[in-house]
Image: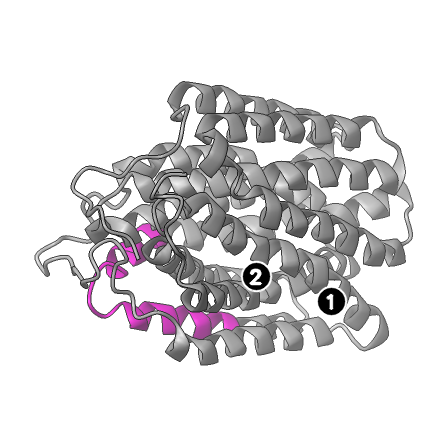
Amino acid sequence: MSAARNATVDRRALALVCLFALLGFGHENVMAAVLPLVVIDRGGDAAFVGILVAAYGIPTIALRPILGRLLDMPHRDRVIRGGAAIIGVAPLGFILPALSTMVLTRVVQGAGWAAYGTSGHAILARIAPRGRRSEAAGYYNAMPALAVLLGPAAGLWLYANVSEVGPFVLASALGLAGLALTSRLPSGATARTGVDTPVRPTVRLVAGLFDRSAVIPMLLIGTFMSVQSLFVIFAPVYARVKGIPIEQLGLYYPAYGAVVLVAHLTLGRMSDRFGRWPAVGLGCVLAIAGLSVAALGAGLAGLLVGGILYGIATSLVTSTVSAVTMESVPSERTGSAMATYSVGYQLGASVGGAAWGTVITLAGYPWPFILGAGMVAGTLVLARLRLPRGEGREPRGAASGRA
């Protein structure tokens, strides 16, 4: 076994950043299944659900590159705390009854998540040692899976048994818990050099916002994750269209989340052992199979089997692409590179969400799943052309020592 694979992970630091991620993704997933129902109950449709997804994604996409640059500067803690504060307060805006205020609230949430989500990825990149980056990314990416396992079911239960307000109060509490945790997070000193290396003040934030080394990973994540909303955000819409009792989603989300969680914890390290391209290639094939099953299957069972296959694929693709990004950039640009990479998640969520909402409204099912399979096929082609075949290598100019 190579020395790189024998490298140790700072378990306490990894546990803290994973908890930080869990609180943030939990905040979002508590509302994930409830928001489409609230929209429909207030007179909206699937297209308006897509508008909410886009309203959330646009500020996240626009702000992440700037925030990534700020995370490479000495006062990065302000970015982390500010994002947590915003997502802690914003969900309370959904208590207001108008559809227009829901759009405004999602914009504010998106701005907060731009800082919160980018911070988590940047800290992870600084603490993950060479040879175990895909494994560390797998643990980190298990947090949204755990949030899917618990969050939507909790939100639906509160919505059905307490009040419409309940899920939003819980989401706010989770965000504020993330704010409280920020004082315990790793300081931000880079794991590559052991020394904080801030970017000089003369760096212009507007110039070169997207780190070129992370553009391909951003595109891979964006195209692959664009279909996730079909299994998470639009599952309640699918249930309404197919006449499936909403209560059954209380079983669907935990089953989907449990499989995805186990997959992240066990398969995230696969590309550290077998190479980057094989892991992503297998993931894309499984995702296409899952989308095909959902398109052909009838009812909730077809959606669940398709979602499970796609969820397993997600564990392979996201951890691998995250590791590729960490390996491609020197330590002084970690924040910028991880911000560029994580924009892919929001591009996929916002553009995909808006597109699938329109497709569902105009054409109905199974067309979103068919078109989604074509999108993942595009990911497969891009990965085949641009990903390394074996393990990742240290970027030029990075220190060889690892924590």
Left or right of 37? Residue 354 is: left
**Image location (x, y in percent) of residue 58:** 45, 50
**Image location (x, y in percent) of residue 365:** 78, 32
The magenta stretch spans residue 77? yes
| C-alpha gap between disc 2 and disc 1 | 13 Å
Whether tag 2 and tag 1 are in contact, CB under 8 A, the answer is no
- Which amino acid type corresponds to the residue marked 2 in the rendered image? Phe
Q: Residue under label 1, please give it.
A: 155
Q: Main secondary structure of the magenta part?
A: helix
The residue that appears at 25% across and 55% down in the rendered structure is: 69
Task: Looking at the picture, tell me which residue is in the foreground, 84 or 207.
Answer: 84
Q: Residues within 10 Å of mark 2 (few under 14, many from 20)?
A: many
Q: Name the quadrant of the N terminus.
A: top left
Task: First in sequence, mark 2 or 1: give its number.
Answer: 2
**Image location (x, y in percent) of residue 338:** 35, 49
Q: Name the quadrant of the C terminus.
A: bottom left
Q: Residue under label 2, please give it.
A: 25
- Which amino acid type corresponds to the residue marked 1 in the rendered image? Gly
Q: Which residues are magenta?
A: 63-88
The residue that appears at 71% across and 26% down in the rendered structure is: 289
